[in-house]
Image (cartoon, rainbow, N blue to C red):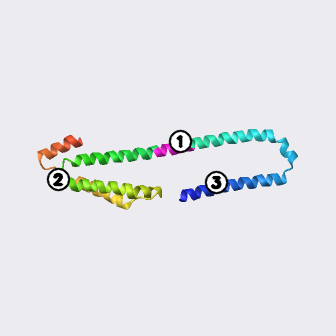
Amino acid sequence: MQLLSTGLFYIGGSVLFSVLGLWLVRKFAPYEILEGHKEIAGFIYGILGTIYAVILGFSVIFLWEQYHDAETVADREASQLSNLHRLAQALPADRQEAFTLSLEKYCRLVIDEEWPLMDERKPSARAHEQLLEIWREGQALDPQTGNEVWSFLTRGKIDSS
């Protein structure tokens, strides 16, 4: 909402400033003087239009790159969460359930809380805390049997060195 009001303020202010300038020129400059400069004014309008088009083009490219970067980060995070969920399948049932519930809780917090807060450029403390909880749970995983170690090495591609 703040972006909308700021945009309307700047656009409305620019239009108001332009109309005021036009009114002042028409009021104080006689028609004969204006008539003699209309050819030059056409070239100036052409140059200003070109400059505006270039600035607008760069703005669109810049915003598109930001959108693409955000999309890439979201895809990467979703892929990593999917990999963690697959890795959890190698855990014993009790630890598997707790770990997958932590992953699902984090996903819900990101979708329901963090993304709306990102519109306001605010972080979600709850989502961050849940991510730290997943990290702590992952650090606490300690494969005990040979099958668990082998499962982690083959499914998670963890380096054994």
Element at label 3: helix
Q: Nearer the viewer, residue 105 or 46?
A: 105
Q: Could you give the CA–CA distance between mark 3 and mark 1, rounded to whole angstroms?
A: 21 Å
What's under tag 1, amino acid-wise? Ile
Q: Amino acid at mark 3?
A: Ile
Dot 1 falls on a residue whose secondary structure is: helix
Residue 51, numbered label: none
> Position of 116 compared to 27: left or right?
left
* Mark 2 or 1, nearer chain start: 1
Tell whether label 1 touches label 2 (CB within 8 Å): no
Kindly report the secondary structure that dominates the magenta region of the rendered protein.
helix
Give the magenta range: 59-67
Residue named by callout 2: 93
Q: Give residue 33's position: percent from left, percent from top.
A: 86, 46
Circles 3 and 2 in contact, beta carbons < 8 Å = no
Taking the spot 66% from the left edge, 56% from the top edge, the residue there is: 13
**Mark 3 or 1, nearer chain start:** 3
Q: Which residue is mark 3?
A: 11
The residues bearing labels 3 and 2 have C-alpha atoms spaced at a distance of 60 Å
Of circles 3 and 1, the one toward us is 3
Mark with earlier residue (3, 2): 3
- Which residue is disc 1 drawn over? 61
Q: Residue at 52% across / 44% down in the picture?
A: 62
